[in-house]
Amino acid sequence: MASDSQIVTCPSCGTKNRVPVAASGKPSCASCKAPLPWLTIADDRSFAKVVLESKVPVLVDLWAPWCGPCRMVSPIVERMAAQYAGRLKVTKVNVDESPAVARDYDAMSIPTLLLVKGGKVVDRMVGAVPETQLTQFVSRSVT
């Protein structure tokens, strides 16, 4: 199972913060209170808690390490966590290690990107896309 928390350096003040993968609120810096990027990893066992129970919208990246297009889009997906800090959680799911999530969300091709809001998929995108297109995709569901 994925780790329960990770260390995130605040982009505003440089303070290192422990950020849980699942929480009822939004992560913010313990020092300056700025919103923190929320980038998590989920698997078959943790997906419901990390993604479906999230109070903020979640961009889910269904990917695999051997997939070239997945590796191309991964840095863009990760930048979304910083760009939408406090308004979006980004969760990566390795489909090779999480076949139930891949099956449940019809990840026939990867990368498959899902936008989940209130526990429901509100939008999906398949394939590697330019950053401007991914930003538009996310901004439709994140306020």
Image (cartoon, grey):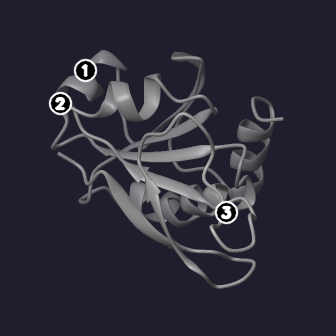
Question: Which residue lies at the image location 27% right of the left edge and 51% below the top edge?
Answer: 64
Q: CA distance from mark 3 to mark 2?
A: 28 Å
105 left or right, relative to 76: left
Q: Earlier in the sequence, mark 1 or mark 3?
A: 3
The residue lying toward the viewer, choosing from 11 and 79, is 11
> Which quadrant of the figure contains the C terminus?
top right
Residue beneath disc 3: 82
Residue beneath disc 2: 99
Question: Which residue lies at the image location 17% right of the left edge and 43% below the top edge?
Answer: 96
Query: Residues at badges 1 and 2 in contact (C-beta under 8 Å)?
Result: yes
32 left or right, relative to 92: right
Could you say which disc has been placed on residue 103 in the image?
1
Disc 1 crowd, CA 10 A, few/some/many (<14, 14-19, 20+): few
The residue lying toward the viewer, choosing from 38 and 69, is 38
Mark 2: secondary structure? helix
Amino acid bearing label 1: Arg
Residue 25 lies, in percent from the top left, at 60, 39
Residue 57 lies, in percent from the top left, at 63, 32
> Which quadrant of the figure contains the N terminus?
top left
Mark 1: secondary structure? helix
